[in-house]
Amino acid sequence: MNKYCPKCGAQLEEGVLFCGSCGAKLEGDGQQDQAASAPQQNFQQNVMNLVNNTADETAEYDADDINKNKSIAGLAYLIFFLPLVSCPESRFGKFHANQGLSLLIVAFVGMIIFNIIPFLNFILVPAFSLCVLALIIIGLLNGLNGKAKELPIIGKFRLIK
């Protein structure tokens, strides 16, 4: 039976007292608990990898532009055209406006498609809505924190130049 670190979810060798990945101290045997929680930890690790492994283009933008427009950039995930109206010269604002527009299009098209599918729409629509909400939160936090980080999966598309 495989043993997993309770802190980071890394697979462990038999008999180790500390995790080789994060350094967490392992208490007792605990194989049953760790093996039972391994699928959940693997899922969480995969989600975090998806979020963290997106392109971070923050270094390409002017620091003054970021500091001046990061609150507007964060709000682009709620009202995508806000940076285009309030700070049209900001490359940082345009980046987040593009991400917000991409998310709006995906959400709109996804809702239409999932509402058409009979019998499964009551499962698919809420699941899709939660995914869109997660992307909105990720984008909002990136914008407000002054990061030009692409959204997972849909962030690579450029609609606004």
Image (tube, rainbow, N blue to C red):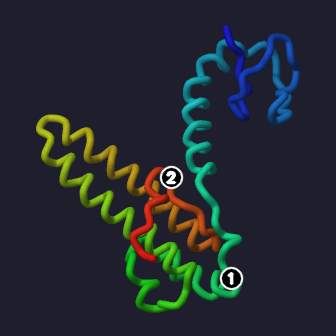
Label 1, label 2: how many angstroms apart (C-alpha)? 23 Å
What is the tally of numbered marks visible in this picture?
2
Mark 2: few, some, or many residues within 10 Å (few <14, many ≥20)? some
Q: State the residue position of label 1.
A: 62
Residue 52 higher or lower than 57, as above or below: above
Picture quarter with the N terminus = top right
Q: Amino acid at mark 1?
A: Asp
Residue 81 image point, x, y percent: 38, 81
In which image quadrant can residue 50 be found?
top right
Q: Which mark is residue 93?
A: none
Please indicate whether residue 24 sits to the left or right of residue 82 in the image: right
Packing grade of label 1 (10 A; few <14, some 14-19, many >=20) is: few
Tag 1 near tag 2, CB within 8 Å? no
Q: Which residue is rendered at x = 56% and y = 24% of the image?
A: 39
Q: Amino acid at mark 2?
A: Pro
**In-image side of 42 versus 7 (left or right):** left
Q: Name the residue located 26 percent from the left edge and 41 percent from the top edge.
A: 124
Secondary structure of the residue carrying numbered label 1: loop
Mark 2 lies on residue:
152
| Residue 8 location (% of width, % of height) | 71, 34
Q: Residue at x 57, y 66 (%)?
A: 141
In the rendered image, residue 151, in percent from the top left (x then y), is placed at: 50, 58
Q: Quadrant of the C terminus?
A: bottom left
Q: Secondary structure at mark 2?
A: loop
In the image: residue 137, left or right of residue 8: left
Q: Is residue 24 above or below residue 51?
A: above
